[in-house]
Amino acid sequence: MNNSQNNEFQKNEFQDKVLIVTGAGSGIGRATAELFAADGAIVAVLDWNQPAGLETQRLIQDSGGRALFIHTDVGSGSSVNAAVQQVVDRFGRIDILFANAAIQIIRPVDQMTEEEWNEQARVNLGGTFLCCKAVIPVMRRQKSGCIVIASSPHAFQTYRGYPSYAATKGGQLAFMRAAALDCAADGIRVNCIIPGATETQMLKEHFANSPGHKQVLLDKIPLGRLAAPEDIARGVRLLASRDAAYITGTELVVDGGLLAQG
């Protein structure tokens, strides 16, 4: 196969594939939705923020792509089930799930309320479980599918004030490994993407709460810059691609070398 044939093969890999992206209204979710749509995929844009989700849908459609926004609370089983059913009714299948939606509550252990702990667990860890639970039967009938879960470097090392967030992100890693084993025989691969410090609204809020931390963080990143959302989106695309056909039950770190830094 010559280079031009290989490029065409790669270009068409996601043509007409059906992708669900949660938290697709902004940041990494939006960048991933736009990237796959540009590659020809049909993208179901799931988000609790209706204006943001509709904006992602508009951006994709204005660029000639195909997208459907579905207002969804990933922490609610009935909401997730209804969204997944709508995708199946409309498009007939689900090829890829990017479980990306998350919230971040920064609070030391002794200052965090029970309600805050439960809400972060409901959205981050519960949302991952509910989305996987809903799409796996669809993928099982197809005998194929790919799930990518957005975890975090906080699963490996964290800061003061992040006990709940770190717990949910570590939980996603453990959940991913077990889900990969449950699904392997049905041709479904499950992996995590570990986004490094990425220029998103969540990170901007962190910097606002921790003045001076941006430069401290930049000094620790060997590649010397924050990730753009598109950097993470390309990692998701890699995990969903044929090039990753033998990769399941593991994580891909996209962090500019941050976790490797002593």
Image: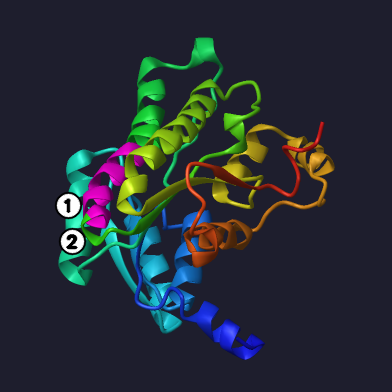
Q: Quadrant of residue 172?
A: top left
Q: Residue at x 45, y 38 (%)?
A: 103
Left or right of 97: which side holds 105?
right
Q: Which residue is rendered at x = 24% and y = 47% of the image?
A: 134
What residue is shown at x 47% (from left), y 76% (from top)? 39
Foreground residue among 142 and 75: 142
User: Is the residue under label 1 in contact with that under label 2 (CB below 8 Å)?
Assistant: yes
Relative to 56, 110 lies left or right: right
Q: Residue at x 37, y 16 (%)?
A: 114
Q: Which residue is mark 2?
A: 86
Per the model, the C-alpha gap separating discs 2 and 1 is 6 Å
Give, as a single range, the part of the protein colored magenta. 127-140
Three-letter amino acid code at the position of disc 1 = Ala
Q: Which residue is mark 1?
A: 82
Residue 208: horizontal and vertical position, in percent? Answer: 65, 38
Dominant secondary structure, magenta: helix
